[in-house]
Each structure stands twice: as structure tokens, then as C-alpha cells.
Image: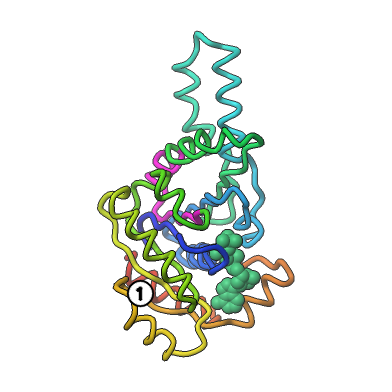
């Protein structure tokens, strides 16, 4: 797996689960270095991976503002140290690193955090072979160009018409805000191939594949177990792996 993939879609369709599955697949590819980014201020990927949040992008933003305020003559040094501080903010598990955006305390800071996140992803993604970004639900981060330079926009939906409509809307917005990316729809929690076929006939989005409703995923989430521990034989993990390697080789 190579490149930068951003996972978007309606709330609750499985974005974090699929981000965690792709992160899990990184562990099997010892030759590559992977980065998982939780771009959702609500969090969730940290728990799905059982990887601690060392320092969030929002923490770093605040530290930089404080540093500029207290050493106003030293702005260049502060800017130069951001790359290093970003790397220091990552938590790591084997060949997988993790960064979370965090949540600003004040409403007015969301824009600043988002632009800091955009810069952070640009700085870090170049240093990893594979980056997976678990985006906030809906269209806002794509609309605000937080997610700007990616290789694959991986839209996720369950079988619901609402989920597909949100995916289509995100794609329409992405067509004007994201440069040179591929787009595909990954269907999640389907109960049969017939459901996938029905959706294929009713959307113009290219369907990359589908993942089944999976009792193991449910159990892992129920107990808060790390998805990094999913067994290699997990059919959902294997299905995700086939789709990812076809797209991101
Ligand atoms: N293939 C699957 N089989 C069974 N359960 C699943 C599957 N995929 C996701 N789920 C369950 O669906 C729920 C929502 O999943 P998840 O948190 O990944 O969605 P999300 O899109 O990240 O949500 P949010 O928009 O709130 O961030 C979780 O309880 C998860 O266990
Ligand atoms: Mg989520």
C-alpha cells in the first residue's frame, strides 16, 4: 500500500473502522511505514487502534502560538521546529504511527486547527509510505480544503440511500477542492452481494468493493479491543486488503 487515502462519508457508516482496518494492514507490510491520522475532532481512531494520543495537532497549535507570543523575535525558529515537533507528537506501534487532530476548546478555533491539520498532513505524509486519514463525518473538511492533496478519496457508505447521497455530495464538492485524486465508494455492513448490485445500478460513483456486516468487528468494538489485533484470517480484513492493494499498490 502506497499513497495518501482519505476516508469520508456520512456519520456512523464505518469510517473509523475502515481506517483501523487499513492501519492494521500496514502492520503486515514490514517494508512500509504507515501513518494513521484521526482528523475527526470527536476522536475514536485512537481507541480503535489502542494507540495513545501523545500530543494533538490542537495542542501543537496552542504551543506554537504561545512560543510566538513569548519569543516574538524568534518566529523563524518556531516555524522551523514545527516539523520536529510534529514527529515528536506521534505515537508509534511497530511500523505504524498515529496522530490525532484533537478538539479546540473554543468554537472560533476550528478553522485554525483545520488549517494547522492541513499543513501537518502535508509535512508528515511525505515522510511515510502510506497515510490514512479518518475524516470528520460529512462534507465540511473537504469543503474547507482541509483534505487537499490526496491520492484516493475513499467514500464509505452503508446500504442506506442517505449514506450514498452524502457520499455523492462529498464527491461533487471534492471535484472542485481536491487536486488529482481518484475516488471510489466502499460499501460497508452489507448483507449480500445483491445489495451491492442494487447500489451499483443506482449511483454513478465507482464502487471499489464491499465489506460484510461482521460479528467480529462488532465484538471488538463492544469490548474496546484494538483492531490492530484482528486476526489475519478475518474475512473483512482480507476483503479490505484486496481492495486496498488493488488501489494503492
Ligand atoms: N463491517 C462492520 N460490521 C459490523 N459492525 C460494523 C462494521 N463496520 C462498522 N461497524 C460498527 O458501526 C459502528 C460505527 O462505526 P464507525 O465508528 O467506524 O463509524 P464512523 O463512520 O467512524 O462514525 P462517526 O461518523 O461517528 O465517526 C460501530 O459500532 C462499528 O462497530
Ligand atoms: Mg469515526
Q: Nearer the viewer, residue 11 or 155?
A: 11
Q: Position of residue 69 (x, y in %)?
A: 58, 15
Disc 1 residue lies near ligand 1 with CB under 8 A: no
- Residue 230 visible to an observer of this rendering: no
Nearer to the camera, 240 or 182: 182
Q: Is residue 223 above or below residue 235?
A: above
Q: Position of residue 230 (x, y in %)?
A: 60, 73
Secondary element at image label 1:
strand
In which quadrant of the rendered image does the N terminus lie? bottom left
Residue that sits furthest to the right in the current view: 223
Q: Which residue is mark 1?
A: 208
- Tell me the magenta residue range: 120-135
Q: Position of residue 224 (x, y in %)?
A: 71, 66
Q: Is 15 positioned to the left or the right of 168 in the image?
A: right
Position of 7 relative to 62 (above/below): below
Find out whether residue 70 is within the magenta segment: no
Quadrant showing the C terminus = bottom left
**Where residue 112 sits: x, y (%)?**
51, 33
Amino acid at each position: 500500500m502506497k499513497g495518501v487515502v482519505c476516508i469520508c462519508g456520512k456519520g456512523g457508516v464505518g469510517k473509523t473502522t475502515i481506517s483501523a482496518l487499513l492501519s492494521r494492514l500496514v502492520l503486515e507490510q514490514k517494508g512500509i511505514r504507515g501513518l494513521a491520522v484521526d482528523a475527526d475532532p470527536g476522536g475514536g481512531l485512537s481507541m480503535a487502534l489502542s494507540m495513545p494520543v501523545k500530543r494533538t495537532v490542537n495542542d501543537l497549535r496552542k504551543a506554537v502560538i504561545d512560543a510566538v507570543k513569548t519569543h516574538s523575535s524568534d518566529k523563524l525558529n518556531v516555524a522551523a521546529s514545527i516539523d520536529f515537533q510534529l514527529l515528536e507528537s506521534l505515537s508509534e506501534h511497530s511500523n505504524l504511527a498515529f496522530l490525532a487532530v484533537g478538539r479546540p476548546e473554543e468554537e472560533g478555533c476550528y478553522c485554525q486547527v483545520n488549517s494547522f491539520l492541513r499543513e501537518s498532513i502535508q509535512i508528515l505524509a511525505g515522510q511515510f509510505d502510506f497515510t490514512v486519514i479518518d475524516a470528520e463525518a460529512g462534507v465540511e473538511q473537504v469543503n474547507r480544503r482541509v483534505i487537499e492533496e490526496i491520492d484516493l478519496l475513499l467514500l464509505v457508505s452503508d446500504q442506506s440511500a442517505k449514506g450514498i447521497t452524502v457520499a455523492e455530495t462529498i464527491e461533487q464538492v471534492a471535484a472542485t477542492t481536491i487536486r488529482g485524486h481518484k475516488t471510489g465508494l466502499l460499501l460497508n455492513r452489507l448483507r449480500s452481494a445483491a445489495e451491492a448490485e442494487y447500489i451499483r445500478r443506482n449511483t454513478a460513483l465507482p464502487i471499489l468493493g464491499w465489506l460484510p456486516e461482521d460479528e467480529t468487528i462488532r465484538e471488538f468494538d463492544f469490548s474496546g479491543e484494538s483492531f490492530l489485533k484482528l486476526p489475519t484470517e478475518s474475512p473483512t480484513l482480507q476483503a479490505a486488503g484486496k481492495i486496498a492493494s488493488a488501489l494503492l499498490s
